Image (cartoon, rainbow, N blue to C red):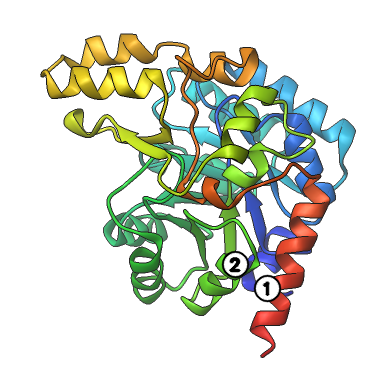
Amino acid sequence: MKTRITELLGIEYPIIQGGMAWVAEHNLAAAVSNAGGLGLIGGANAPGEVVREEIRKAKELTDKPFGVNVMLLSPHAEDVAKVVVEEGVKVITTGAGSPEKYMDMWKEAGIRVIPVVASVALAKRMERCGAAAVVAEGCESGGHIGELTTMTLVPQVVDAVDIPVIAAGGIGDGRGFAAAMMLGAEAVQIGTRFVVADESIVSDAYKDKIIKAKDIDSQVTGRSHGHPVRQIRNQMTREYIKKEQEGASFEELEYLTLGALRRAVMEGDVVNGTLMAGQIAGMINKRESCQAIIDDIMTTANKLLSK
């Protein structure tokens, strides 16, 4: 399937793996790229040298294009912004803010910059400052979310900008892919389904929680201080929401989740860890390889779109 995104990024299929903190490391990124999509290394809060090492390890596992997600609120964002240039990365996605201060440097290096946006206004601003495309991410997604749903956000962003739009949030199979294309997107970004991939380093306990999740098992914390996060409900989310309702300070709530994502991913703490996952978790019922995931999505999508 050819779209402006496949041509822009040099990939076989218009599927991009989300740049998820702690999850999106070199093994997963390389596996997605080898399967014909675009794998991403999640920079998260990692120092520049850690990201450099991840990039080099990914290059050992794939000769296909892959990218890096730069989390702009990270204290190491400036170092990471330089590392991706030095290491010859060709695609960057960004989250948690605007990448404008780095755009000139990245564009001079020939990097395709694709910011994640949750509103039409930010999408238009990113187009003006030179973004190659945007990811329009709806609130069905896991992790940090905006307010609009994918169904309403994607077509409005498509109508507002001339650059290609990638749909994200609540997409995990060929039906979701086809729906995104009908809304005007030219690719999809998928996170939660790749969390349970064979090549994902995520703990078995975390993967099992996603596979066993029902449609109503995700919960949003952090709305009271303007930083909503979608995850699978557990003891930690119950305690967090109780404290929110009691008027706990931002600092107290942040302390509650300190290191919780790492504990869930690396140690399998599914009781007090942060199990970031989208609403699509209720549709995921097995582990499989990145190749099998992409083949399944594209087979179903091609059948639907050719009717």
Q: Secondary structure at mark 1?
A: helix
Residue at mark 1:
301
Q: What percent of the width, then of the height, locates residue 265?
A: 60, 21
In which quarter of the view is residue 60 placed?
top right
| Closer to the camera in the image, 301 or 206 | 206
Locate residue 261 relative to residue 303 in the image: left or right: left
Image quarter (top left, top right, bottom left or bottom right) of the N terminus: bottom right
- Looking at the image, the residue that sits furthest to the left is 247
Q: Is residue 168 at least partly visible in the picture?
A: yes
Q: Residue furthest bottom?
A: 307
Q: Nearer the viewer, residue 296 or 66?
A: 296
- In the displayed structure, does residue 41 sit left or right of residue 141? right
**Secondary structure found at label 2:** helix
Residue placed under numbered mark 2 in the picture: 177
Q: If you read the primary sequence from the N terminus, does the residue marked by circle 1 or circle 2 appear first?
A: 2
Q: Residue at x 64, y 32 (%)?
A: 207
Asked if labels 2 and 1 touch by Cβ distance under 8 angstroms, the answer is yes
Q: Tell me the residue at 39%/70% (across/down).
A: 161
Q: Amino acid at mark 1?
A: Ala
Toward the viewer: 118 or 103? 118
Q: Looking at the image, can residue 130 be seen?
A: no
Say what amino acid the circle numbered 2 marks: Phe
| Image location (x, y in percent) of residue 230 | 39, 37
